[in-house]
Amino acid sequence: MIKGRPAAHAILAFVAAVGMALQPARAPAQTYPSKSVRLLAGFAPGGPVDTVARVVAQRLPAYLGQSVVVENRPGADATIAMELVAKSAPDGHTLYLIQPGVAINPALYRSVPFDPVKDFTPITLIGESPNLVAIHPSLPAKSLKELIALARGRPNQLFYGATSSPTLLATELMSSMASIQITRVSYKGAAPAFTALISGEVQLVISGIGTLLPLAKAGKVRGIAVTSARRTTLAPDIPTVAEAGLPGYVATTWYGIAAPGATPRNIVDRINADMRKVLAEPEVRALLQAQGIDEPSPSTPEQLAELIRSEIAKWERVVKVAGVKVE
């Protein structure tokens, strides 16, 4: 028995050594994040999606422990960015500043290279913002009713800037409800569309109030209505589209954080918890309120998933009724 002890000790030492050798191989799967995180925005710099993404990227690293870099991938109403996210590794190191386009594009385009439900893992809602209906100051219209009357007298002679699929459908929904015909001009983001509106290249743009309102206050454009169900604290004197003549009209923009499909739940929960801390910061809330998000609204992954499903159903109906299609 005494002679057998050295052999037993040798076996135990060997097993322990093997266990230690295996630990580094398991560690990366258990450590998140292990490198910087990229946050994709589907539109050009300067617009509301880009602005919200940069607010998140500025503060999330304080809790996540790694830098967050905004990567702008404009084009095809954010489809380029969404395809890239959908095909990225589900390891939490690629995130997406998700917005209504994920629910709208599958109905609006003949085909899209992603499944809006299967290819994304919802993490949390950030909040909801109204759009501003803005027109060129040279138009002889001071209200939405006057704009509608003007458009009826000039069918297809007024041009609107489409900054994204959500604002495109917001405009088409308004046109359909008002029984007017206006001509679409598409841009890769809000910033170039704003430039076109200021120059008079287009006469109407519906886009995020946070980035359009300063232009209205400077007299470069005229804000005549907001697209939310209620007036916004950002511009309480501007009526809603419903108040201004189209009862029942609502077309807001919401923002959230998503990851590629099949991202592990422990990573989703980690980002969700850190985002709640970010959205609770007074400075962040003030920055988001400046973008028209009156009340930041962190959610569970399940609540964001339900919002996406309800938006898919809503905009499928709008596309069908308005007869809008983009090739």
Image: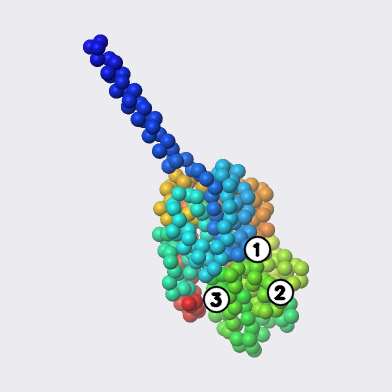
Q: Which mark is residue 35?
A: none
Specify which label sits upstream in the sequence, 2 or 1.
1
Amino acid at dot 2: Ile
Closest to the observer, 65 or 227 = 65
Above/below status of 214 relative to 283: below
Q: Are marks 2 and 3 in contact (CB under 8 Å)?
A: no
Please name the residue that numbered disc 1 is placed on.
46
Regarding mark 3 in the picture, which secondary structure is present there? Answer: helix
Image quarter of residue 234: bottom right
Q: Position of residue 66 (x, y in %)?
A: 56, 44
Please name the residue that numbered disc 2 is placed on.
198
Specify which label sits upstream in the sequence, 1 or 3.
1
Q: How many marks?
A: 3
Above/below status of 271 relative to 74: above
Residue located 51% across and 54% down the image = 95
Disc 1 crowd rating (10 Å Cα; few below 14, some 14-19, many 20+) is: few
Regarding mark 2 in the picture, which secondary structure is present there? Answer: helix
Disc 2 crowd rating (10 Å Cα; few below 14, some 14-19, many 20+) is: many
CA separation in Å, label 2 and label 1: 15 Å
Amino acid at dot 1: Gly
